[in-house]
Amino acid sequence: MSTTQRPGGTLELAGHEIARLGYGAMQLEKVDRAAATAVLRRAVELGVNHLDTASFYGDAVVNDHIRAALAPYSDDLVIVSKVGAQRVDAPVPLALAQRPDELRAQVQLDLATLGLEQIAVVNLRRADQGPGLIARGDDVVPIDDQLAELIALRDEGLIGAIGLSNVSTAQIEHALPVGLACVQNAYGLLDRTHEDELALCADHGIAWVPYFPLGSAFSQFPSPTDHPVVQGLAAEYATTPAALTLAWLLAHDPCVAPIPGTRSLEHLEENLAAAAVSLTAEDLKELDALA
């Protein structure tokens, strides 16, 4: 068993013990190989063993960065991917790919570009609601058809476990018999729209993996780091607003495992510093009141 200290403590994901502070690799689409390698290796060096990627991040560019930086992979590294979209040669370079055959093709592309025989967890990214692309017409696919394909991929050993992304409470409840490893929904200090989904996951021992934990370019997800309460508390703790925000997420529920992304070594280390921030009950009450 590894003796590496995991930032934020650990939780179980699909039979693997992962650091509660993981790393979302999407932003590595916009950097060169050297910069991506530096960030990925530093994350692993600091104890991160949960990496989130997808073949549609830069048309597998991010997967290529991960393979170049980290292969051959350590036994305790858990690489999680997402299916439901694909890169296209068009003014908007991303399109939905929700049909079962398209989901299979994305898993096969992940396996090839990451150099793996199995993806530890694959998240089905539904497109019933924003942010981002919303399914219309032929892109509307029943969730049962999608889950059946993922179950087949799991039975074949090509994926280890199934997760969901961008889903409702009803969809999580419907998929529970499948045996869900995790749920990825947009969630953070200032946007707790999916609090009920988080509670459902906590009740069933399912990891809750929030994306946009530090806000995003989408207007409905403002950055908590700009909030004066967050900035004030961060100053008291001699830490950054980002670390303070992530510390709140870790304290909010033990099933939460954020995957903040960055292309900066400095920001990576600032994010992982959240593990050292122990918020008081009064701090948590003040932060809870912001939503």
Image (cartoon, rainbow, N blue to C red):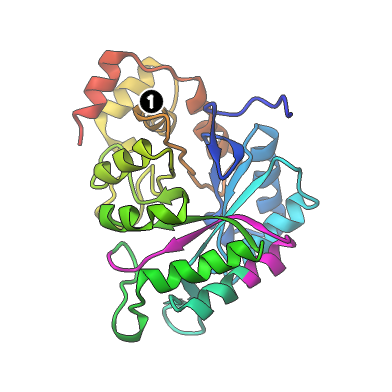
Q: Residue furthest right?
A: 72
Please state if 100 lies on the left or on the right of 232 as rendered: right
Toward the viewer: 171 or 251? 171
Percent coordinates x, y for residue 32 in the rendering: 66, 59
Left or right of residue 261: residue 211: left
The quarter of the picture where the C terminus appears is top left
Left or right: residue 39 versus residue 229 is: right
The amino acid type, in three-letter code, at marker 1 is Ala
Q: How many marks?
A: 1
Residue at 45% over, 66% down: 147
The answer to whether any part of residue 191 appears in the image is no
Residue plotted at (48% across, 77% down): 100
Residue drawn at the location 46% of the way across and 72% of the way down:
85
Q: Residues within 10 Å of mark 1 (few under 14, many from 20)?
A: some
Residue 157 position (above or below residue 249)? below
In the picture of the structure, the residue carrying the numbered disc 1 is 251
Could one spot residue 56 in this view of the protein? yes
* Image coords of residue 128 (percent x, y): 29, 68
161 vs 216, nearest the viewer: 161
Q: Quadrant of the N terminus?
A: top right
Q: Position of residue 182 (x, y in %)?
A: 46, 48
Of 78 and 221, the residue lying toward us: 78
Q: Residue at x 38, y 48 (%)?
A: 212
Q: Percent x, y for residue 54? A: 55, 62
Left or right of residue 168: residue 55: right
Q: Is residue 201 magenta?
A: no
- Asked which quadrant contains residue 243, the reply is top left
* Snapshot quadrant of residue 23: top right
Residue stretch in magenta: 108-129
Q: Secondary structure at mark 1?
A: helix
